[in-house]
Image: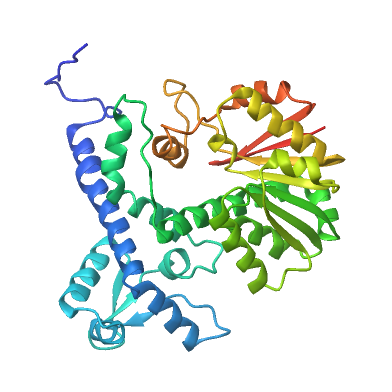
Amino acid sequence: MVKAISEKKNNNDEITMKDQMKKFLIKSLYGFLTVLIFGLGRRVGILDYLQEKAKSKSNTEKISSVTFTINEVSEKLNLERNYVDAWAHTALECGLLEIDDSCERCLRTAPYVYELLINRNQPAYIGDPLGAFYYLAPYQELILDAFKQDGVVPNFEFTDEVIHDINRMSARFGTLIERLFSTNYKEFCEKLQNGGTVLEAGCGYGYNLQVWAKKYEKVQFVGIDIDPIAIDFAKKMVKENNWDDRIEIHEIPINEYAKISIKKFDLITLNQVLHEMDHDVNYRSSIFNSLYSLLKDDGILLVGESMIPDTFAPRQKLLLFDVLHKFLEARFANFYNEKSFKEFIDSTPFTRAEFIKEGGNSIWVIRK
């Protein structure tokens, strides 16, 4: 069906061509340039330099912005001045920077940019999701190959830099689900503060495990994964934080670990792991049978997973990251929506499953 454009004046609630032009040209271009300038600034070291400069200036006061000059950055980082100038000018236009009139030809980070895009130690830091968007561009050829109906899954050989960005983004999601979980299960988490056992199934590089370990200092943790590179990185993270006495890391599949483990856990977390498992329903059921056997009778299985509705389901708010997740992993991942996941849980030994959603974040709290 083709809908003709009416020459009549549009009603106030109708979208005009001007509205669409503003959205697709102006807003999209500003958004694209913001991601591009952020990504370039981080890769050439400008953002890390500003973070180090901020830390050297103050150890106690809250930092709201960082002032610098183009020449300073060019000289300190050995970068071509004209490109630093062009980068800074574009960052000004995109709202990442503003002119600092307190000194000659000075720039400073715009309000909240330091907290959101520079300081990785800030809870509000969103640099890793933006970094993941930034890294999309070089992989367009692989994504094009994925569209072809030849049954071949393209090999996304990500660089270490990209892999760590993706895992840090997943850890940020882990921070959000921990917050959602502790808000809704205060009594359980208060007990956990006094000690307990937690298994992270599919711990990856350990970023999410690190979030939980810092908050629950009296808990004994076990992290398992099948990726040897990720496991090596997670073990180094444990060693660097002097956590060897309370965190074990093992390279082993979930089903194999369930066969040999004598431990039972108060909490098992499955954070952005399920959709990447073998699609076979019997295999997935066997995984949940294993998790069931590893859980204490009063324990909780906490699942953080993108619940992606059907393309033609009624429109929901705050689905951008979930839909992007679907797009990036469409060829090899198998996602659930709320209904299909509940049906899957009903087919396992677990008897209780609660879905909690606040804003764009959601968790499943599953019990025996």
The location of residue 221, given as percent across then percent down, is: 75, 57
Left or right position of 358 against 116: right
Labels in figure, total: 0
The location of residue 231, given as percent across then percent down, is: 60, 57
- Which residue is drawn at the image coordinates 53% and 37% (left, top)? 276
Q: In the image shown, does 89 or 337 lie closer to the viewer?
A: 337
- Which residue is drawn at the image coordinates 85% and 46% (left, top)? 264
Left or right position of 294 against 282: right
Question: To which quarter of the image does residue 87 belong?
Answer: bottom left
The location of residue 359, given as percent across then percent down, is: 55, 41
Is 144 situated above or below 241? above
Is 342 situated above or below 49? above
- Which residue is drawn at the image coordinates 83% and 42% (left, top)? 299
Q: Residue furthest left?
A: 7
Question: Which quarter of the image is occupied by the C terminus?
Answer: top right
Q: Residue furthest right?
A: 297
Question: Which quarter of the image is occupied by the N terminus?
Answer: top left
Left or right position of 297 against 355: right
